[in-house]
C-alpha cells in the first residue's frame, strides 16, 4: 500500500471554486470514483471523485475554502479500502466488503450515474422545460405552439404563445437543442412551473437555471442530520403565505437573478423569492447571508405589522340573498376585472387621495390641431388632443419633479426618477388597459400621436406585452369622448398622481371687457398627499392650463 495525494481534477473551465460540503472523513474507506467533497462554481455544484480505492488518511480543506485544478485536498492509502470506517472484518473478504459497501452507501452508488459531475466533459443532456415567471399572470391559456417534435432550436426561440387578460406573450426556450416530446396542447392553461416540453440540450446551450435544476435533483438525497432537524420549520415556511410587501423592488422584466445553485436551493427551502432579494456579493450576486437577511426582515414585518396595509381589518360587506327580490344570474369575474378590482382597492386603501380641479382654455390648441388634418393624412397619422396632453404633462413633470417620484415606505425613502414615461388609459371591450409611452419629453407631437395610436390599438386587440404596461411615472385617463364635467381618478400606485380629462365644452369667459366663447377642457388631478402637497398640485394644474392655452410655450 502507498499513500497518494487527492488532487482537484479538471474543473471544465472553472477557475476557482468553493468547497461547500465534505462527504468523507479521515478513516473512511472509499471505492474509485466515490465522491470525496462537493465544490460550487458560478453555474453548478460538482462532486470531486476519489482517484482510486483505499482509505482516507487526511482531508486538508474545510467548507468555505477556495480550490483550483491541481490543489491537494487530502491524502489516502491506495488499496486500503474495501469497508466502511471502523469495520472489524479482515481484508481477505473482498466479496463481503463489496456487498457491505453496496448496502452501506447505496446513495453514493446511484450518484455515479447522475449527469451533474459529467457536465464539464461535454455532450448533451435531457431537460424538461418549464414555464418561467409570467410577470404576475397565472393560469393563462396556450393559443399557439411554435415548435414541433424534432425541431432544432436556439436559446430564446419562442416555444409557445399564451394569452393573458392583458397581453399575448411568447415563452422562450432557455436552452439550445432539439425538441423532444411536447407536453402541452392548445387550450391548456399554464402557470409558473408548468411543464412545457422535453428537449435534448447541447453542450453550452443551457442557462444558469439548468444547472440549478440538476443540482436540486443531485442533492435531493443528501440531506444531513442537522437538516432533518429543520424539516418542520422549513415545511412551515413553505406552506405559510408570503408576507405582504417586498424588501426590495423586483427587477425589470427580463432581468436575471444572479445566484449560485446552493443559494437557490436555500431560497426554495425557505420559501424566499430571489427576485425580491438584493445581492451583496460581487456584481450583485446573491449569497446565503442575503437570503437569511431577507427572510428575517419579512418575519419581522409580519410580526410587527409594518408591511403594506391591505385593509384586512376592515369588516367585509355581507351580501343578502338577492334572489328574494327577483330573478338574478351569477357569472364569474374575468381575470382582468378581478385584477383591476384588487389594484383599485389596494391603491385606495394605501394612498391618501386628494383631487385638484382646473379648466384649460384649448380654443387655440384645437384650431391648430384641426389645421394639421391634411398633414396628418400625408403621414398616415391622426392628430388628437392626447399628444398635446402628453407633451404638457411631460413639461410639468420636469418642472415639478416632486410628481415624478415613488415612495418606499419600508425603507423610508423617496425614489426620484430621471425619466418621464406616461401611461395612457385605454377603454377596451375587455376592460381598462394602460400602455406606457416612454421618454415622452424627448418626442415630438407627431411621434407621440403615432405611438399612442399604435399602443391603443394593441390594447384593444389584446396584443400588449407586459413590458409595454410597466414603468410609468404618471397616468392620463380621458373620458372626453364619452362625457362628464369632472371626476376623481384613483392614483395608479406606485405612481403619485394621475390626470383625469373630461369632455371639453364651449363656455363664456370674461376677457376684461366682455364674455367670449372659449372651448374649456376640465382637468382633474388626483394625487398622493403623502408625496405631493396641495400647493404643488395647484401649481401643476395651473401650469397645464397655461401650456395647453398657449401651445407655443411647449417649445420653450
Image (cartoon, helix red, strand yellow):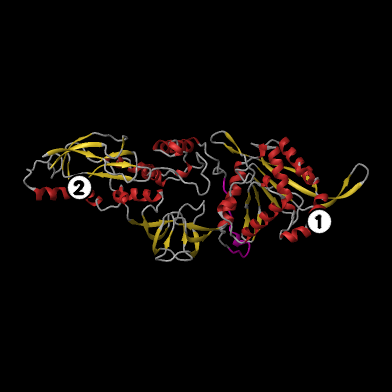
Q: Position of residue 354 (x, y in %)?
A: 69, 41
First of labels 1, 2 by sequence position: 2
Return the residue at label 1: 371
The answer to which image quadrant residue 433 occupies is bottom right
Q: Nearer the viewer, residue 520 or 353?
A: 520
Q: Is residue 132 left or right of residue 520?
A: left
- What span is in magenta? 315-329
Quadrant in the picture for the N terminus: top left
Q: Position of residue 117 (x, y in %)?
A: 29, 48
Relative to residue 199, is residue 388 depicted above or below? above
Return the residue at label 2: 105
Structural distance between the alpha carbons of marks 1 and 2: 86 Å
Q: Is residue 526 rendered magenta in the image? A: no
State the SS at label 1.
helix
Q: Is residue 291 left or right of residue 381?
A: left
Quadrant in the picture for the C terminus: top right
Badge 2, how many Cα within 10 Å: few under 14, some, many 20+? few
Q: Is residue 325 rendered magenta in the image? A: yes
Q: Nearer the viewer, residue 16 or 242?
A: 16
Q: Is residue 212 left or right of residue 321?
A: left
Q: Position of residue 516 (x, y in %)?
A: 89, 48
Q: Nearer the viewer, residue 123 or 537?
A: 123
Residue at 13% x, 49% y: name it: 98
Amino acid at each position: 500500500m502507498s499513500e497518494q495525494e487527492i488532487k482537484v481534477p479538471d474543473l471544465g473551465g472553472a477557475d476557482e471554486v468553493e468547497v461547500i460540503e465534505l462527504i468523507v472523513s479521515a478513516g473512511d474507506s472509499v471505492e474509485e470514483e466515490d465522491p470525496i467533497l462537493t465544490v460550487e462554481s458560478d453555474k453548478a455544484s460538482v462532486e470531486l471523485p476519489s482517484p482510486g480505492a483505499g482509505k482516507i488518511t487526511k482531508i486538508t480543506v474545510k467548507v468555505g475554502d477556495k480550490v483550483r485544478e491541481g490543489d491537494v485536498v487530502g491524502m489516502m492509502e491506495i488499496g486500503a479500502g474495501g469497508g466502511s470506517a471502523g469495520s472489524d472484518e479482515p481484508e481477505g473478504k473482498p466479496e463481503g466488503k463489496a456487498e457491505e459497501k453496496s448496502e452501506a452507501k447505496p446513495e453514493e452508488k446511484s450518484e455515479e450515474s447522475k449527469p451533474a459531475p459529467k457536465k464539464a466533459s461535454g455532450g448533451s443532456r435531457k431537460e424538461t422545460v418549464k414555464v418561467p415567471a409570467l410577470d404576475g399572470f397565472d393560469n393563462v391559456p396556450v393559443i399557439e405552439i411554435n415548435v414541433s417534435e424534432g425541431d432544432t432550436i436556439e436559446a430564446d426561440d419562442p416555444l409557445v404563445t399564451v394569452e393573458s387578460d392583458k397581453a399575448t406573450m411568447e415563452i422562450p426556450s432557455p436552452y439550445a437543442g432539439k425538441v423532444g416530446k411536447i407536453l402541452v396542447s392548445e387550450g391548456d392553461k399554464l402557470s409558473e412551473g408548468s411543464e412545457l416540453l422535453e428537449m435534448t440540450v447541447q453542450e453550452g446551450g443551457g442557462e444558469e437555471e439548468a444547472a440549478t435544476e440538476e443540482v436540486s435533483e443531485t442533492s435531493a438525497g443528501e440531506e444531513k442530520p442537522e437538516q432533518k432537524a429543520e424539516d418542520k420549520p422549513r415545511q412551515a415556511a413553505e406552506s405559510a403565505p408570503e408576507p405582504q410587501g417586498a424588501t426590495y423592488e423586483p427587477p425589470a422584466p427580463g432581468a436575471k437573478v444572479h445566484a449560485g445553485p446552493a443559494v437557490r436551493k436555500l431560497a426554495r427551502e425557505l420559501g424566499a423569492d430571489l427576485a425580491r432579494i438584493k445581492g451583496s456579493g460581487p456584481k450583485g450576486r446573491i449569497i446565503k447571508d442575503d437570503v437569511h437577511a431577507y427572510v428575517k426582515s419579512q418575519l419581522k414585518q409580519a410580526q410587527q405589522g409594518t408591511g403594506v396595509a391591505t385593509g384586512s381589518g376592515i369588516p367585509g360587506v355581507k351580501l343578502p340573498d338577492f334572489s328574494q327580490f327577483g330573478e338574478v344570474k351569477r357569472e364569474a369575474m374575468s381575470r382582468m376585472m378581478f385584477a383591476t378590482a384588487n389594484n383599485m382597492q389596494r391603491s385606495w386603501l394605501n394612498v391618501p387621495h386628494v383631487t385638484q380641479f382646473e379648466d384649460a382654455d384649448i380654443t387655440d390648441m384645437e384650431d391648430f390641431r384641426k389645421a394639421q388634418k391634411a398633414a396628418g393624412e400625408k403621414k398616415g397619422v391622426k392628430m388628437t388632443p392626447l399628444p398635446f396632453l402628453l407633451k404638457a404633462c411631460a413639461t410639468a413633470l420636469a418642472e415639478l419633479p416632486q410628481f415624478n417620484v415613488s415612495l418606499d415606505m419600508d425603507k423610508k425613502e423617496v425614489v426620484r426618477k430621471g425619466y418621464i414615461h406616461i401611461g395612457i388609459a385605454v377603454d377596451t371591450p375587455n376592460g381598462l388597459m394602460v400602455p406606457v409611452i416612454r421618454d415622452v419629453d424627448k418626442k415630438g407631437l407627431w411621434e407621440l400621436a403615432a405611438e399612442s395610436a399604435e399602443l391603443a390599438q394593441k390594447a384593444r386587440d389584446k396584443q400588449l406585452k407586459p413590458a409595454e404596461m410597466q414603468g410609468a411615472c404618471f397616468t392620463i385617463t380621458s373620458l372626453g369622448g364619452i362625457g362628464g364635467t369632472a371626476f376623481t381618478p384613483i392614483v395608479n400606485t406606485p405612481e403619485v398622481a394621475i390626470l383625469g380629462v373630461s369632455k371639453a365644452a364651449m363656455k363664456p369667459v370674461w376677457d376684461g371687457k366682455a364674455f367670449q366663447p372659449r372651448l374649456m377642457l376640465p382637468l382633474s388631478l388626483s394625487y398622493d398627499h403623502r408625496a405631493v402637497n396641495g400647493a404643488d398640485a395647484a401649481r401643476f394644474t395651473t401650469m397645464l392650463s397655461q401650456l395647453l392655452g398657449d401651445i407655443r410655450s411647449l417649445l420653450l
